[in-house]
Image (spheres, helix red, strand yellow):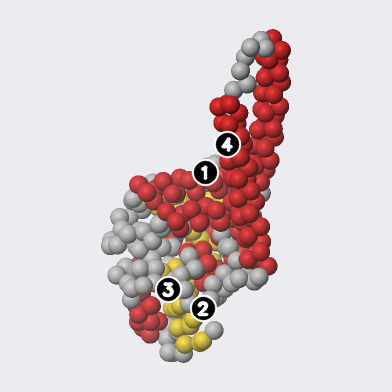
Amino acid sequence: MDKVSFVIPCYRSELTLGHVVEEIRAVMTQLSAYRYEIVLINDCSPDDTLGVIRGLCETYDNITGISLARNFGQHAALMAGFRHVTGDIVICLDDDGQTPAGDVGKFLAEIEAGRDVVYARYLNKQHTAFRNFGSKINEIMTRFMLGKPKELYISSYFAAKRYVIDEVVRYENSYPYVIGLVLRTTKNICNVDVKHRQRETGHSGYTMKKLFGLWFNGFTAFSIQPLRFATMVGIFCAGSGFLYGIYTVIKRLINPAVPLGFSSLMSAVVFLGGMIMLMLGLIGEYVGRIYISLNNSPQYVIREIIRQEGSEHEI
């Protein structure tokens, strides 16, 4: 009998997490061919999410709670959960109730059919316009920077075979990006259609700052395409400057009365100077991440692990 591990990063979900867990329990009762466990990761939530996790762990013997020492972000929380699962299939979903646990059977059917990873595709996304914009940018970034197939939809609700998760957790550098790690592990991925729900309460934890951090993490941790783009821009600017120089010389020879043009010169200097600073900043981003990784900055720090028997293991 295969075992399914549910991994749920938790942040500001004290009012919704209990409903999510009960829905998982209800659907897994119907899927009697599988055993299951639930791993809840508190990403240093400022509300009473940790208290809710404690209560669930005390009530059910197949729930494990993990409390992080500070807010490390969704992908770091997933990595913490992945390193504590014991199942043959791992399913990740959100803590806000928008990803329906009742559709788990669709994911398991595709996994049993031979797929390595299965992502939910939302036919009616209920996110805010801001969050939908962020998802669209992330979609473009993963397609061009990470080689994601155009027809594949990526979401936070997905299932994966254990060997994929084992490969993902081999990554120990400071900036985990689960989508990139999955895409470099296997291409045997598909989508299943699910209905996306309205948020029951609260709002998304993704701010503009966090979204920008996620995008930068994605394309600097798993792709050198930005550096190649910088090279191409440099070649274009150098070529344009060379051609413009030839044009200026020819124009001067044909008509010596033509003024040299201080304004156009300053515009070119400012443009090229700005491009140089932009490219240096991009290179600095890569170098900075290398430096932090060499200093062994942790992906996450676990404060405690909570299980039903009340044993809280200090890390």
Considering depth in this image, is 263 or 39 the residue closer to the camera? 263
Tell whether label 1 touches label 4 (CB within 8 Å). no
Instruction: Using the image, determine if residue 241 lies above or below residue 146.
Output: above
* Disc number for residue 232: none
Whole-number angstrom distance, CA of label 3 to CA of label 1 = 30 Å
Q: Amino acid at mark 1?
A: Ile
Where does label 1 land, which residue?
A: 140
Whole-number angstrom distance, CA of label 4 to CA of label 1 = 30 Å
Q: Earlier in the sequence, mark 1 or mark 2?
A: 1
Where does label 4 land, which residue?
A: 270
Rendering quarter of residue 87: bottom right
Foreground mark, 4 or 1?
A: 4
* Disc number for residue 44: 3
Q: Amino acid at mark 4?
A: Val
Whole-number angstrom distance, CA of label 3 to CA of label 4 = 45 Å
x%, y% of residue 315? 54, 84
Where does label 2 land, which residue?
A: 302
Whole-number angstrom distance, CA of label 4 to CA of label 2 = 48 Å
Q: Earlier in the sequence, mark 4 or mark 2?
A: 4
Q: Seen from this angle, which residue lies furthest top? A: 254
Q: Residues within 10 Å of mark 3 (few under 14, many from 20)?
A: many
Foreground mark, 4 or 2?
A: 4
Q: Earlier in the sequence, mark 2 or mark 3?
A: 3
User: Which residue sits at x=63%, y=42%?
Assistant: 276
x%, y% of residue 117? 55, 57
Q: Amino acid at mark 2?
A: Ile
Q: Amino acid at mark 3?
A: Cys
